[in-house]
Amino acid sequence: MQPRTYGMLLVGIATIMWSTAGLFVRALDLDLWTVLGWRSLFGGLALTMIILAKQRISAVPGKVPLYFYPLFGLMAATSMYGYVGALKLTTVANVLAIYATVPFVAAIIAYLWLKEAISRRVLIASLIAFVGVVIVAGFGARPQDIAGNSLAFLMTLTFSILLVAARRYPALRLAPVNALGSGFCLLLCLPLMSHSLPSWQEILVLAVFGSTTSGIAYLLFMTGGRYIPSSEAGLIGLLDVVLGPLWVWLAFSEIPSIATIIGGAIILIAVIWYLWSGMRGAQPRRTLKNV
């Protein structure tokens, strides 16, 4: 498997995991702080187990300043909080539509920070996808969605910074960064979350929710993002916009609006075109020894 294919595979798996977040949020009859606190706890535990299971200290030769870990950990915490908070305050479709701007945000940050050129294919696909985002967010949003949409954009911005940082600093260990992010989230939620123990069914849902969408998915996406351009990783992540509302519709009959359906279809077409047009001639950027 070539490094670029490997990176796309990891990003794709992470995207599918993230797309189930709306299912978990809708299945839990708990307040925002309680959901976020337990999700952070289980996400942090999953990442800690991954850290302890690894035999080597650093992913690649080289070192990064120690203060990078709490710094990027705070960004990860902000991204995690914004994601769940937005899902609680607005519709799944709106959250995912705003998240769909990741390719643009990541591409701009990568260009300014890494001088990473934006390919014509990524630009064309991103512009087509942006039309879908405008349709979903512009015609499907309600005035009461402002708070949720703001959190969704905050999540998008911090996540894009982390995505580019993973490429900028190959020696940065991603599992500890995201584990710290989960820990910061938990500390933030402790004074505000309910101190009543959820039912065992809810704890089971929270455990799966946290370990997959907060733990493993973040790690897979950031790791895969090291092997492909940041804008490309963000573009593949747009599949979340299509899959997320689909799962919620199938499980909870939360019917997406016509605007969401049309916009989601345009986004899906853009991603499929991009992936199909780039099947041949892909050049690997790194070797797998850097995993």
Image: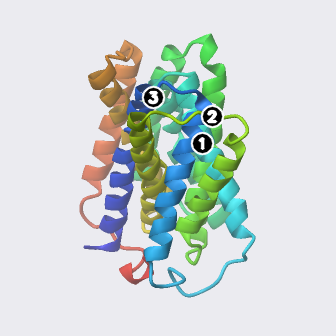
The residue located at (58%, 45%) in the rendering is 80
Q: Callout 1: 10 Å neighbours few (<14), some, many (20+)?
A: many
Residue shown at 50% from the left, 51% from the top: 42
Residue 21 image position (x, y, % from top left): 43, 37
Please indicate, yes or no, whether residue 83 appears anywhere in the rendered image.
Answer: no
| Mark found first going from the N terminus, 3 or 1 | 3
Q: What amino acid type should be assigned to the residue bearing mark 1? A: Gly
CA gap, disc 3 to disc 2?
Answer: 12 Å
Query: Is the C-beta separation of discs 3 and 2 under 8 Å?
Result: no
Q: Which residue is mark 2?
A: 33
Query: Is residue 47 positioned above or below 137 on the image?
Result: below
Please give the label number shown on residue 37. Answer: 1
Residue 145: % across, % down = 60, 18
For label 2, the SS is helix
Camera-nearest residue between 226 and 249: 249
Direction from residue 172 to residue 268 in the image, left or right: left
Viewer-nearest residue: 58 or 211? 211
Determine whether, in the image, residue 57 is placed left or right of residue 213: right
Residue 51, horizontal then vertical, whole percent: 50, 72
Pick the front one: 223 or 119: 223
Do tag 2 and tag 1 residues touch (Cβ < 8 Å)?
A: yes
**Picture disc at residue 28:** 3
Q: Is residue 131 or residue 206 the one in the foreground?
A: 206
